[in-house]
């Protein structure tokens, strides 16, 4: 695992849920850690706003990308909300 990917996994708890349209249809959820374990690599990262970041994932064998939006807000419960979706 690359250093950036390792640091992102360490910074984001493994319990965060990440769902794509395909995953929603299957009624199961994938974690960012699972995406990395399946061979997805971090292609880009940007802090979009004060409390929101976007992580872009690519895979050698797939033609689409997956983008995850991570919201960190200490006033909410859960404090970290992640939403992932495919970009085709």
Image (cartoon, helix red, strand yellow):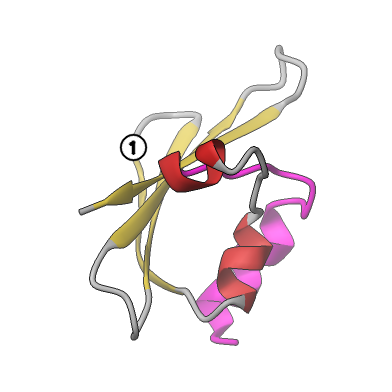
Image coords of residue 54 (percent x, y): 39, 46
Asked whether residue 29 is drawn in magenta, I would say no
Please tell me whether residue 56 is drawn above or below residue 37 in the rendered image.
above
The stretch of residues the image draws in magenta is 1-20
Image coords of residue 34 (percent x, y): 66, 65
Instruction: Give the residue at x 67% y 44%.
Output: 28
The C terminus, quarter of image? bottom left
Instruction: Give the residue at x 34% y 85%.
Output: 60
- Residue 87 falls left or right of residue 19: left
Q: 15 and 64: which one is in front? A: 64
| Residue at the front extreme, as displayed | 26
Q: Quadrant for residue 53, please give it.
A: top left
Instruction: Give the residue at x 68% y 52%.
Output: 12
- Residue 43 falls left or right of residue 33: left
**Residue corresponding to mark 1:** 48
Instruction: Give the residue at x 63% y 70%.
Output: 7
- Residue 87 falls left or right of residue 37: left
Image coords of residue 36 (percent x, y): 58, 72
Image coords of residue 43 (percent x, y): 33, 70
Kind of element beneath mark 1: loop
Please tell me whether residue 33 is drawn above or below residue 60 in the rendered image.
above
Please tell me whether residue 29 is drawn above or below residue 76 in the rendered image.
below
Label 1 packing within 10 angstroms: few (<14), some (14-19), many (20+) = few
The N terminus, quarter of image? bottom right
Q: 84 and 12: which one is in front? A: 84
Q: Quadrant for residue 59, please give it.
A: bottom left
- Residue 20 falls left or right of residue 13: left
Q: How many marks?
A: 1
Please tell me whether residue 55 is drawn above or below residue 7 in the rendered image.
above
């Amino acid at each position: 695992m690359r250093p950036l990917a390792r640091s992102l996994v360490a910074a984001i708890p493994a319990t965060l849920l990440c769902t794509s349209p395909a995953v929603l249809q299957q009624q199961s959820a994938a974690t960012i850690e699972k995406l990395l374990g399946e061979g997805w690599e971090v292609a880009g990262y940007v802090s979009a706003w004060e409390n929101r970041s976007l992580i872009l994932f690519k895979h050698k064998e797939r033609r689409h990308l997956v983008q995850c939006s991570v919201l960190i807000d200490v006033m909410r419960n859960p404090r970290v909300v992640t939403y992932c979706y495919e970009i085709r």
